[in-house]
Image (cartoon, helix red, strand yellow):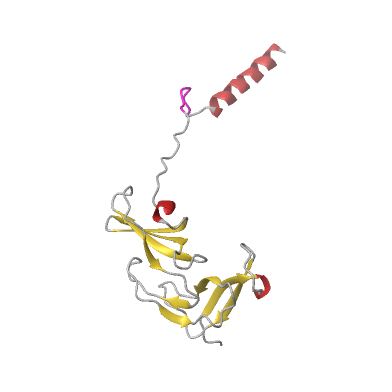
Amino acid sequence: MFRKEVETSAIVVLVLLLASCGQSGNQSAPTAPAFFQLVDAMDGGFSYAYAPSITVKDGTYHVFFCSMAVLVPTWDAIRYTSSTDGKTWSTPQIMVLPSSYLGRAFSSDGINWSAPQTVIPSSPFPPYTHDVGMAGDATGSIVTPHTLVGFAAPYKLADVNHWGQWDLYGVYVNPP
């Protein structure tokens, strides 16, 4: 009986040793990440900022993000800010104002963009259409001649806008 108890005790000690493998007895708690503010929306006068797209080019951070449009407060504007050190940021500038048409623009570097071109005017879209996307290839070129356009709109295309109650719809620019 004594031998069985010793074997059991030895197994328990071995398990405890293996469980603590690589750990020292003096571990400190993990350090919390150092959060810092990129954009102060309230100070900027647009009350919210979200969904950043961050690009680094030639040592500069370029950030495009969604925010409240001052002139059209019901839809988001896309703003831009930049930083060379990741700590001090330029004053956010509106780059794209909301509109109710499907447009496209081109960029060779993801930072500088051509003027938007209208692909579909606003009249064919149902009320409260938003979050529009177009079929493109790996280079960003639009798939032609039958370009599929996807967009979000209220359930059953109802003429009401309830936050989060949207379906995904589609339409072709040049139907097959």
The percent position of residue 86, horizontal first and vertical second, equals 33, 49
For this view, does 24 lie left or right of residue 13?
left
Q: Quadrant of residue 80?
A: bottom left
Q: Indicate left or right for 133 with 45 as reference.
A: right
In percent of the image, x 42 and y 73: which residue is there? 140
Residue appearing at x 48%, y 28% in the figure: 23
Residue 13 seen in the figure: yes
Q: Is residue 107 left or right of residue 50?
A: left
Q: Is residue 115 magenta?
A: no
- Taking the spot 69% from the left edge, 11% from the top edge, the residue there is 2
User: Does residue 62 show up?
Assistant: no
Left or right of 71 in this view: 8: right
Q: Residue furthest top?
A: 2
Looking at the image, the residue that sits furthest to the left is 58
Q: Position of residue 16 (x, y in %)?
A: 57, 24
Is residue 27 highlighted in magenta?
Answer: yes
The residues colored magenta run 23-28
- What percent of the width, then of the height, locates residue 92? 36, 58
Viewer-proximal residue among 51 and 17: 51
Residue occupying the far right of the picture: 1
Relative to 88, say whether 136 is above or below. below
Q: Quadrant of the N terminus?
A: top right
Rendered view: 118 above or below 111 = below
How many numbered marks have been drawn onto this rendered protein structure?
Answer: 0
Magenta stretch secondary structure, dominant: loop
Toward which corner of the image does residue 105 lie, by quadrant?
bottom left
